[in-house]
Amino acid sequence: MSDKVAVFDTTLRDGEQAAGTRLGRREKLTIARQLAVLNVDIIEAGYPGSSPEDAEAVQSIAAEITGPAICALSRAIPVDIEACGRALARSRRPRIHTGIGASEIHIAGKFVDARYGKDLAGKKVTILRMAVEAVKLARQEAPTDK
């Protein structure tokens, strides 16, 4: 086990969730430059699937910032993961952060459609399969061996 602690900064994505906060491409790029100066290991640059503006911001950061890995957030669905891949295409160290709600509360609220399964057990199997497929696609879209 390594003694290294990796700093994963979410300011550019999670920081926007504060009421009244909106970071544009220029603001995100300015902050990303400073995070690189601080030697942050991973910068979560945004959620490209949320808007064309956020995709453009992630793309700009991925093209310019060297040193830190540049990460983009996605839901565990192909359209989001592919948007991340396009936004990270010029990154030297791309990373996709994908997630899926798997608690019973999430399943009850987000996976109500019968296509996910007829009961809780069936839905859990589907969600696990979706998660595995999402990780496989993310690895293709943001290869670590560039």
Image: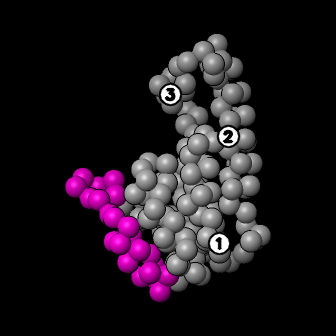
- Amino acid type shown at disc 1: Arg
Tell me which numbered mark, 1 or 2, is placed earlier along the sequence: 1
The residue under the point 35% across, 72% down is: 26
Label 3 secondary element = helix
User: Could you tell me which quadrant the C terminus lies in?
Assistant: bottom right
| Residue 76 on image: x %, y % | 60, 42
Q: Residues within 10 Å of mark 1 (few under 14, many from 20)?
A: many
- 102 within the magenta span: no
Residue 131, label in figure: 2
Q: Residues within 10 Å of mark 2 (few under 14, many from 20)?
A: many
Spatial distance from mark 1 to mark 2, Cα to Cα? 22 Å
Spatial distance from mark 2 to mark 3, Cα to Cα? 15 Å
Tell me which numbered mark, 2 or 3, is placed earlier along the sequence: 3
| Residue 138 on image: x %, y % | 68, 52
- 26 within the magenta span: yes
- Residue bearing the label numbered 3: 110
Q: Nearer the viewer, residue 116 or 120?
A: 116
Residue segment shown in magenta: 16-38
| Residue 144 on image: x %, y % | 73, 67
Q: Residues within 10 Å of mark 3 (few under 14, many from 20)?
A: few
Magenta region, mostly helix, strand or loop? helix
Residue 36, label in figure: none
Spatial distance from mark 1 to mark 3, Cα to Cα? 32 Å
Cβ atoms under marks 1 and 3 closer than 8 Å? no
- Residue 14 in sight from this viewpoint: no
Number of numbered markers: 3
- Residue bearing the label numbered 1: 93
Residue 139 versus residue 126 in the image, above or below: below
